[in-house]
Amino acid sequence: MKNFNENGRSMVEMLGVLAIIGVLSVGGIAGYSKAMNKYKINKTTDQVSMLVANIRTLFSSQGNYTGLNNGQAIKFGVVPEDMIEKTTGGSATGNLKNAFGGEVVIAASGGRQNGDGEAFNIVYSGLSAEACVTIATGDWGSGQSSGLIAIAAGASKNSTSGATTSTGEDDEPITTQKGVDAVLLGVSTDQSEAGSSTSAAIAIPGGNKNPTPMSVTNAVNACACTGTNCEVAWKYY
């Protein structure tokens, strides 16, 4: 009689191995997703800081930002190359995209004295709630030298026409030029006027009620968006 030694794994052992592989895969995907989100947030911070510095430097001798929009910003060379959306032929479309794949809008606007072109807005759309909170609560400037007038965060309002003036947390007029998609600055913090279940949080440098950096509590309440429907908007001199 001959004896045979059979080597192999039982079905239970195979299921156990597959379960372990599954757990490791899920953990790896979650870790990768978190790392990518952090990378995109850091990239957004760098992009906005570069845009603000370049725009303010370019227009410093002019005294105002009249005529500034996405197309002009691209022509002036103030926009990082990786933000410019291009056709298959390599030509700029005039549209700008952020690290999260959402739209970026740059536009001249009124300042605190309602003068045309005294300030400019930068609006980042297509953000998740987590990204909205993290970006909105960053230190974008607390003093006059930073040029920051206000920063706002909230759900997309998709405003397309007209102009509005409202007051911020400290009754300081914040005038914004509509005609740019989803601009938040100037949207009233009163829910009945904002047209949304969540109100936009607006922080102002040196403000008494809601100074910059924006508080986490205000940002979380304002960034209660679904999917990637959040926005952060900056208004600078």
Image (spheres, grey):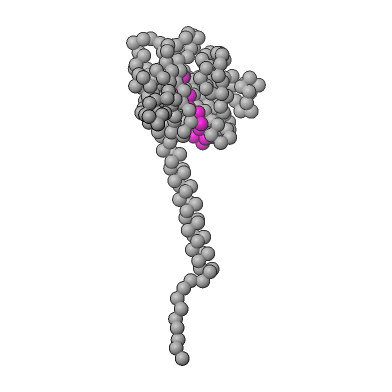
Residue 82 spot, x, y in % from top left: 38, 31
| Count of numbered labels shown in the rendering | 0
Give the residue at x 48% y 47%. 30
**Residue found at the far right of this picture:** 192
The vertical placement of 51 against 115, above or below, is below
**Which one is nearer the viewer's eye here, 2 or 223?**
2
**Residue found at the far bottom of this picture:** 1
Can the viewer see residue 136?
Answer: no
Q: Quadrant of the C terminus?
A: top left
Q: Which residues are magenta?
A: 120-132
Residue 179 spot, x, y in % from top left: 52, 17
Give the residue at x 61% y 28%. 198
Give the residue at x 42% y 23%. 94
The vertical placement of 198 against 237, above or below, is below
Can the viewer see residue 222?
Answer: yes
**Which one is nearer the viewer's eye here, 77 or 61?**
77
Quadrant of the rendered image containing residue 200: top right
Main SS, magenta residues: strand
Q: Is residue 92 left or right of residue 22?
A: left
Q: Assess whether residue 30 is covered by the magenta stretch.
A: no
Give the residue at x 51% y 68%. 13
**Which one is nearer the viewer's eye here, 109 or 3?**
3
Residue 177 spot, x, y in % from top left: 51, 15
Residue 221 spot, x, y in % from top left: 58, 31
